[in-house]
Amino acid sequence: MQDKLIIKYIKKKNQKGMEILIDQYNSLITSVIRFHLGKLSNYEEECVSDTLLAIWDNIEGFEKDKNTFKNWICAIAKYKAIDYKRKYLSKIETSNLEDQTYYIDKNLLKIEIQEELNETLNHLSKEDREIFTRYYIHDESIVDIANDKQIAISSVYSKISRGKAKIRKSLLREGGK
């Protein structure tokens, strides 16, 4: 009942919805982010804020038939935390500092990000994993992927769409964490 009220208020862009959301789910959001950020605790508060903003901005994307509100929130928090890891890693890579501490953190973060990615993409076939990686990680165009794999552009779109559905389904089974 409380979730319906939160969703209703946020859809109407009423601040009361965010107040209720924060009261009810702030500790859950924080714990999901803390778990996925690991040692990057200095980004935690900013990541929580970005997660709340993402919920506010994307509430129309919540589909109660496909997911519970709680799981949807957890998935947003998880992927915001992963984005922060990537952002931190890119800052380190562009930095001129050659401090050994940064080197260790950079390698650790790369490993953690790769593990998260592998866990997420593990539900896909080898070919679909390759397409996802090329499209979402390496920013290759659909046309380039289709030409390289010698398949129709529509097939690439279909594989991406079906892959997202498989990943979404697997996240639901895992409780959005």
Image (cartoon, rainbow, N blue to C red):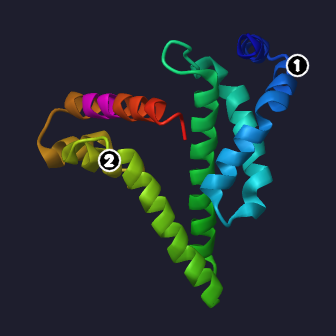
| Residue at image mark 1 | 16
- For badge 2, the amino acid type reads Asn
Q: In this view, does 2 lie above or below 41?
A: above
Residue shown at 82% from the left, 25% from the top: 18
Q: Can residue 135 be seen in this view?
A: no
**Residue 48 in picture, x, y percent from top left:** 75, 45
* Residue 155 locus on image (x, y percent): 20, 30
Residue 160 belongs to the span the image colors magenta = yes
Observer-nearest of 135 and 118: 118
Locate the C terminus and report the quarter of the image it occupies: top right
Residue at figure coordinates x 30%, y 40% from the top left: 142
Q: In which quarter of the image is residue 9?
A: top right
- Identify which residue, 67 or 174, lies in the foreground: 174
Secondary structure found at label 1: helix
Alpha carbon separation for disc pair 1 and 2: 39 Å
Q: Earlier in the sequence, mark 1 or mark 2?
A: 1
Q: In this view, does 175 lie to the left or right of 173?
A: right
